[in-house]
Image: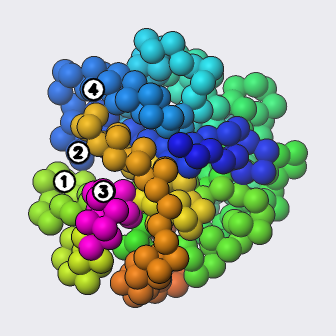
Amino acid sequence: MRYIRLGDRGPKISVIGLGFWQAGSRLWGNRGGDVAEKVYVIVGEAYNYGINFYDTAEIYGGGLSEKCLGEAIRRHGIRDEVVVASKVAGYRWIEHSILKAIKRINNRIGFKIDLIQHHWPPPLYAPICKVINALEKAVDRGMVEYYGLSNYNTNLLIKAIECSRKYEPISNQVQYSLAYRVVENRLKKYMEEMGISLIAWSPLAKGALAGLRQPKTLAQKTDPVFRKASTDNELQGVLRRLADKYKVSKSVIALSWLISMKAIPIPGTRRPKRVREYARAGELRLSGEDLELLDRASRKYLRYWGVEYSSLSLNRLIPGFLQQLGIALIRGI
C-alpha cells in the first residue's frame, strides 16, 4: 500500500480509503441486525491490507454508521493507527449547531475523530464564513484535529478559504469517477494549487464501474451517473480489456485511474471480500498507454454533467430546517 499526506499539513493516509455510507443505510437496504459485525470484519480486512482511512457521516443510517465504525475500530484496538473522518450535515451553519453535532459524532464513534467535514454547502441565505469559523473553533477547542469540506464547488471553496482566520481546509470531498469528471474542468486544478486533497466519493459510480449493469438498491436506481455508466459500452469495454490484461477486476482499474489522478477514492462495500480488490488498486500502477485508453473512453464525461461541479447543489435552495426535517423523518439516508 502507498501512503500520502492529507492536504499540506494533515496525517499520512493510504492512497485509497473506505466509505461507510452503506453501513446502516436505508438507501442501500443495509439495516439488518448484522451490520455492526459486517463493519467489524470489513475494518479488520482493510487494516490488514494497509487501508487506514475511513469516512462516515452523521446522517448515514441516522448515526448507525458512525456507531458501527467506532465500535469496530475499538474492538480491533487500532485507534492510534487509523485516520477517521466524519461529516456534519450541510443544513448546519450556526456555530452552536455545528459544535454540538461534532460533540455527538465523537460520542457516537467513541473517540475524537481526526477530520470533520461540512457535508454540503449551507442554504443560500447562510453565510459561508459562519460555517468555516465554526469548524475552525472545533479545531481550536481540540474537538477534532483538522477540518475539510464536501461538495463545495470552486467559487464556494474560494470563499471558504477567504473566510478562514487561522486554519484552512485540508480536503474537499466531491463526486469523481471515470463517469463523472466535472471536477477536472476547474475545481481540481484550484484544489491542487491550494494544497487541498480531493477525496472522491462514488468512485465506482455506485457499482456501475465495477461492472454492475442493473441497479439493486434505491441508491443505485435514483442515480443518473449509475444509469449512464452501466450502459456505456465503450467505457465498459475498455475496463474489461484492462481488467483482463492486469488480471484484476474492473473496480481495481477504475480506482487505480483515480489514484493516478491524485484523488483519494473512498469506495464503500457491504462485502468484506471487496476490500482486497480495493487494496489492490492502491498497489497497481497503470501504464501511460492504458491511462490514455481510459481517458479517451471517458473524456465525454468532462462536460456531460456540466462545466462546474454541482453535486448536491440543489440542497442550497431548500431551507435548512426543511432539510433537517426531511432527513430526520427517514432516520438518515
Sequence-first disc among 4 and 2: 2
- Using the image as rendered, state which of residue 71 and residue 267 is in the foreground: 267
Residue 228 at what x, y percent from top left? 25, 76
Could you tell me how far apart the alpha carbons at marks 4 and 3 are, in whole angstroms? 24 Å
- Badge 3, how many Cα within 10 Å: few under 14, some, many 20+? some
Residue 227, how many percent across, how many down?
A: 22, 71
Q: Are marks 4 and 3 in contact (CB under 8 Å)?
A: no
Query: Pointer 4: what residue?
Result: 38
Q: Which residue is mark 3?
A: 248
Closer to the eye: label 1 or 3: 3
Q: Nearer the viewer, residue 113 or 240?
A: 240
Dot 2: element: loop
| Residue with the mark numbered 2 | 28
Q: Nearer the viewer, mark 3 or mark 2?
A: 3
**Structural crowding at the residue carrying mark 1, measured as other residues with C-alpha within 10 Å and reported as few (<14), some (14–19) or many (≥20):** few
Task: State whether the magenta stretch is mostly helix, strand or loop.
Answer: helix
Name which residue type carries label 1.
Answer: Leu
Give SS at disc 4.
Answer: helix
Q: Are marks 2 and 1 in contact (CB under 8 Å)?
A: yes
Label 2 and label 1: CA atoms lie apart by 6 Å
As drawn, the label of residue 132 is none
CA neighbours of label 4 inside 10 A, class few (<14), some (14 to 19), many (20+): some
4 vs 3, front mark: 3
Report which residue position mark 1 lands on.
218
Task: State which region is magenta.
Answer: 241-254
Give the distance between the C-alpha atoms of the residues marked 4 and 2, in whole angstroms: 14 Å
Q: Earlier in the sequence, mark 4 or mark 3?
A: 4
**Residue 136 visible (yes or no):** yes
The answer to whether 231 is drawn above or below residue 217 in the figure is below
Which kind of residue does numbered mark 4 sit on? Answer: Lys
Query: Does residue 117 lie above or below 272 as drawn?
Result: below
User: In 3D space, how far apart are the residues under numbered discs 3 and 2 (Cα atoms)?
Assistant: 25 Å
